[in-house]
Image (tube, rainbow, N blue to C red):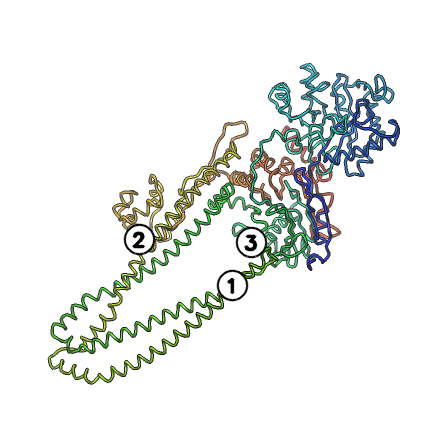
């Protein structure tokens, strides 16, 4: 075990649940004590498979159970309870409702035995109303049997008056009506009712006459009804009733539909129609109440899973935040621990309780920079003043790729992240390697995206197909190569201009030389002319050696910076072959080093030899100096300047080699131009493919957010980058110049560049510019033209939000025309779908309109939280309550007499079905019950 693992570790092995499925792989191993403590905390609501209508052998029609004990004895009942527990465990049942007709006889023994196996029991019974309608009545997990028996009596079913022919044979009907039973059970006795098998005999939709059926179905006290299968299996009339299509049957809130067929045989408990997935954080009647109030979020019918279309498998990495801790005596969050839920998590609390500190700590440990200068300053301020130096932040994450694994990321402030695997071993990984794309937005960063078109375009890329990454990489490579090509081209052109300027002297020099030659001077000074040529040749040789020396030195330095070696790593399956490859590369590196040293030595020897040769040549020329001087004196007598002739000849000899170099440079410029043309074509092809992928992404966005948000895309139509470059040239173009360019039909970068190179007349005719504007553009320098040409213009993304009320016809408004809150709403809608990684936002309501939170954001959030993890810090009750957050974490200041620290109390963590959490939501987000009731009265609700 590593040093990290051995220092105060706790070993945990527990199944982790996701969407009702338990992972067999242990989800925690050798984690530090603080992280292990976090994992012991509640992580909010999870799925429970509940069979809410289990019967017992007390009823004569019960089959499928035999025992060696006599039926009426306690050992017989215990034997049944043990067998039931085994069947429940085999079927994956987490909770049952015990609902014998008119009896609670088996409740106590079944509850005791199943509790020992970790299975919850909602005690209760089934009764028939005076109309003959069957009702399931469930009570809290710990409800005393005596009280339940009293409730039966209260319903007009005393102990000796519950059966027609005998115990367990034919149950009597209650003299109470269906609405009266609902009232007594739910209002007086704090239980909960389910209208049993509403689509079958003795069911609400099957038995009642129309008037009574309408009255009872729309009763606000009726929260749930049991159906025998999927909604699609209901008769057409019944399906229209439960879906709210018939006006007479329309309810204020939909009836929660559950599957809980009678279990009259233990083998039936595996039947999907006998159980329902119910999401709860604190199982109990309150949890069932909340589930029935919000069935869309909390109920899942197993019978309907077969009707759901298969979703295509996604290969993108899924990341989940599991737990987070802070350790540092000076830190505001010291000792705090959070065990995240896989769906919607909400941090609540008054101002200054540490919500933003949690978000910024998460950003810090994941090594993600903030967006914008203001966000950066806020982030750094929170770290320095609230998290404080010396604090260790630990984050446990789960990733699915390449296989389900847990990693612990630790980061000291200040310091760098350290990553540990499940065994406690430190891994040589970067945070990005395991958590590539958690999206974190601090306060007002959503508004920052709304102002930045580049960031908006990046949001669209989340909806692209996976092969877009390769095309983007190719596009970036083309841009880099185009930039390098421009630099090489400009350097070559500058050198070519320099050569042409020098070579422009040659015609005049050669003409002067002919004048000298016509006077016979060339023959008289032939030897001196040849000596001048020799001198130029020796000088060229030395220059060539200097050039070679620079090449050898560059190669030697590159070999030092980029050695030929393979990095060492963990044991590999073909380690022997990797070792052979490593040895071969190291041998090559040594050989190259030796060869370069040999070349450098040979070059040095040649330079020394040339110096000796040059010295010998100088001596020989000196020996002929007297003959040269006599020749010059003879020419002076003829009034001819022989020295001028030699200087002229020497200058021509110096310039003559430049002719060859000029031709070579011209060829190089043509090659660079050809290569640039190919790069532009390649980039254009990548752009075209990417645009096709982006059009599909746009179609996906419009489908997913239909009626709420829509986007359109125009290819390479965002010219701000081009106009910005033109503005930077300081050519004093007025704004109407850019307006004319943008207003030109079919304006494109390619077309613009072609006309610039065609000249002033072409520019003026195409773009309707003034004389001066056209001339300025036509006279732009070559380097500027190349820079304009290689600008990678983005596509123009237009985002529109439907600002109409829910019942109105759509009214679409473009992003720049929206209010700040509406802009943030549009960006959030784009952020929600098509991702399997967490989305973290600090107080999104600061940038949102309340109406759009309730009407637009919440419906999307409720849909997407099934597919990805969310963490919001919020002051707005709409998000945790209407969004039905699976985990609400309430932060407070103080704790153990301290006022300068935050505390997360055990009772302050859970979902809205936990009474203590519900009260906190009322107090912190609603201002308390009195304030809420006062607002409701003033609104007239």
Front residue of 89 and 344: 89
Q: Residues within 10 Å of mark 1 (few under 14, many from 20)?
A: few
Q: Quadrant of residue 181?
A: top right
Instruction: Residue under label 1, please give it.
Output: 584
Q: Quadrant of residue 932?
A: top right
Query: Quick check: can you spot residue 726?
Result: no
Instruction: Residue under label 3, please give it.
Output: 377
The residue positioned 26% from the left and 49% from the top of the image is 759
Q: CA distance from mark 2 to mark 1?
A: 53 Å
First along the sequence among labels 3 and 1: 3
User: Tag on residue 126?
Assistant: none
Q: Secondary structure at mark 2?
A: loop
Q: Position of residue 728 (x, y in %)?
A: 38, 53
The residue positioned 14% from the left and 70% from the top of the image is 514
Q: Residues within 10 Å of mark 3 (few under 14, many from 20)?
A: few
User: Cβ–Cβ below 8 Å for labels 3 and 2?
Assistant: no
Instruction: Residue under label 2, please give it.
Output: 780
User: Cβ–Cβ below 8 Å for labels 3 and 1?
Assistant: no
């Amino acid at each position: 075990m590593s040093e990290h693992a051995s220092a105060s570790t706790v070993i945990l092995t527990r199944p982790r649940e996701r969407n009702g499925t338990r992972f067999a792989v242990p989800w925690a191993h050798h984690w530090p004590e603080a992280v292990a403590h976090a994992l012991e905390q509640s992580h909010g609501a999870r799925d429970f498979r509940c069979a809410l209508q289990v019967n017992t052998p007390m009823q004569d029609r019960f089959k499928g159970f035999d025992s060696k004990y006599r039926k009426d004895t306690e050992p017989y009942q215990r034997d049944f309870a043990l067998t039931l527990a085994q069947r429940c465990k085999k079927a994956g049942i987490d909770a049952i409702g015990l609902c014998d007709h008119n009896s609670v006889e088996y409740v106590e023994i079944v509850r005791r035995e199943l509790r020992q196996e970790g299975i919850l029991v909602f005690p209760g019974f089934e009764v028939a109303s005076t109309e003959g309608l069957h009702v399931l009545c469930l009570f809290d997990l710990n409800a005393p049997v005596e009280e339940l028996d009293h409730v039966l009596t209260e319903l007009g079913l005393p102990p000796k008056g519950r059966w027609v022919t005998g115990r367990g044979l034919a149950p009597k009907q209650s003299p109470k009506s269906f609405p009266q039973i609902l009232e007594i059970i739910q209002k007086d006795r704090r239980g909960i009712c389910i209208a049993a098998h509403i689509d079958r005999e003795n069911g609400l939709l099957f038995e009642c006459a129309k008037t009574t059926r309408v009255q009872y179905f729309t009763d606000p006290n009726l929260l749930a009804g049991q159906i025998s299968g999927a909604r699609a299996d209901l008769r057409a009339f019944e399906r229209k009733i439960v879906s709210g299509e018939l006006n007479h049957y329309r309810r204020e809130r939909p009836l929660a539909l559950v599957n809980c067929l009678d279990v009259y045989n233990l083998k039936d408990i595996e039947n999907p129609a006998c159980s329902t997935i119910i999401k709860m954080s604190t199982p109990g009647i309150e949890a069932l109440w909340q589930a029935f109030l919000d069935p869309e979020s909390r109920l899942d019918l197993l019978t309907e899973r077969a009707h759901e279309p298969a979703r295509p498998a996604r290969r993108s990495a899924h990341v989940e935040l599991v737990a987070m801790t802070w350790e540092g005596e000076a830190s505001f969050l010291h000792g705090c621990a959070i065990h995240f839920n896989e769906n919607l998590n909400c941090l609540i609390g008054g101002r200054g309780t540490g919500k933003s500190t949690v978000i910024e700590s998460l950003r810090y440990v994941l090594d993600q920079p903030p967006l914008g200068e203001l966000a950066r300053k806020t982030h750094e301020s929170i770290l320095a003043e609230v998290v404080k130096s010396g604090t260790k932040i630990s984050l446990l994450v789960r990733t699915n790729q390449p296989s389900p694994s847990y990693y612990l990321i630790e980061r000291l402030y200040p310091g760098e992240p350290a990553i540990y695997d499940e065994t406690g071993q430190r891994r040589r990984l970067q945070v990005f390697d395991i958590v590539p794309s958690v999206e974190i937005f601090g306060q007002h960063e959503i508004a920052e995206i709304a102002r930045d078109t580049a960031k908006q375009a990046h949001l669209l890329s989340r909806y692209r197909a996976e092969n877009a990454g390769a095309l983007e990489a190719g596009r970036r490579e083309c841009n880099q190569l185009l930039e390098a090509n421009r630099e090489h081209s400009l350097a070559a052109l500058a050198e070519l201009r320099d050569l042409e300027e020098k070579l422009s002297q040659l015609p005049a020099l050669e003409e002067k030389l002919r004048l000298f030659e016509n006077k016979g001077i060339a023959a008289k000074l032939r030897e001196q002319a040849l000596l001048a040529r020799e001198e130029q040749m020796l000088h060229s040789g030395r220059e060539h050696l200097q050039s070679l020396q620079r090449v050898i030195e560059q190669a030697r330095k590159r070999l030092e910076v980029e050695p030929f070696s393979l990095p060492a790593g963990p044991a590999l399956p073909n380690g022997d072959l990797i070792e052979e490859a490593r040895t071969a590369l190291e041998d090559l590196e040594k050989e190259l080093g030796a060869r370069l040293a040999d070349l450098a030595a040979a070059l040095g020897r040649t330079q020394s030899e040339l110096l000796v040769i040059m010295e010998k040549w100088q001596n020989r020329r000196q020996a002929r100096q007297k003959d040269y001087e006599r020749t010059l004196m003879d020419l002076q007598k003829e009034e001819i300047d022989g020295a001028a002739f030699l200087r002229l000849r020497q200058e021509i000899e110096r310039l003559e080699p430049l002719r060859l170099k000029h031709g070579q440079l011209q060829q190089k410029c043509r090659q660079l131009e050809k290569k640039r043309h190919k790069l532009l074509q390649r980039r254009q092809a990548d752009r075209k493919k990417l645009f096709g992928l982006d059009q599909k992404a746009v179609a996906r966005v419009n489908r997913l957010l239909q009626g709420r948000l829509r986007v359109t895309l125009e290819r390479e139509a965002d010219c701000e980058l081009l106009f910005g470059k033109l503005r930077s040239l300081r050519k004093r173009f007025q704004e109407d110049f850019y307006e004319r360019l943008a207003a030109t039909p079919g304006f494109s970068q390619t077309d613009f560049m072609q006309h610039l190179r065609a000249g002033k007349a072409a520019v003026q005719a195409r773009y309707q510019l003034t004389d001066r504007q056209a001339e300025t553009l036509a006279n732009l320098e070559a380097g500027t033209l190349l820079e304009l040409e290689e600008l990678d213009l983005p596509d123009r993304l237009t985002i529109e939000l439907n600002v109409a009320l829910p019942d109105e016809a759509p009214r679409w408004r473009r992003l720049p025309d929206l209010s700040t809150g509406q802009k943030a709403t549009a960006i959030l809608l784009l952020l929600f779908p098509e991702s399997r990684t967490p989305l973290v936002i600090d107080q999104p309501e600061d940038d949102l309109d309340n109406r759009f939170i309730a009407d637009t954001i919440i419906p999307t959030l409720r849909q997407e939280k099934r597919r990805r993890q969310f963490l919001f810090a919020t002051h707005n009750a709409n998000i945790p309550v209407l969004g039905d957050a699976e985990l609400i974490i309430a932060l407070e200041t103080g704790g153990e007499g301290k006022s300068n620290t935050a505390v997360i109390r055990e009772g302050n963590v859970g979902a809205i079905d936990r009474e203590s959490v519900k009260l906190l939501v009322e107090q912190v987000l609603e201002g308390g019950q009195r304030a809420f009731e006062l607002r409701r009265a003033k609104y007239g609700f």
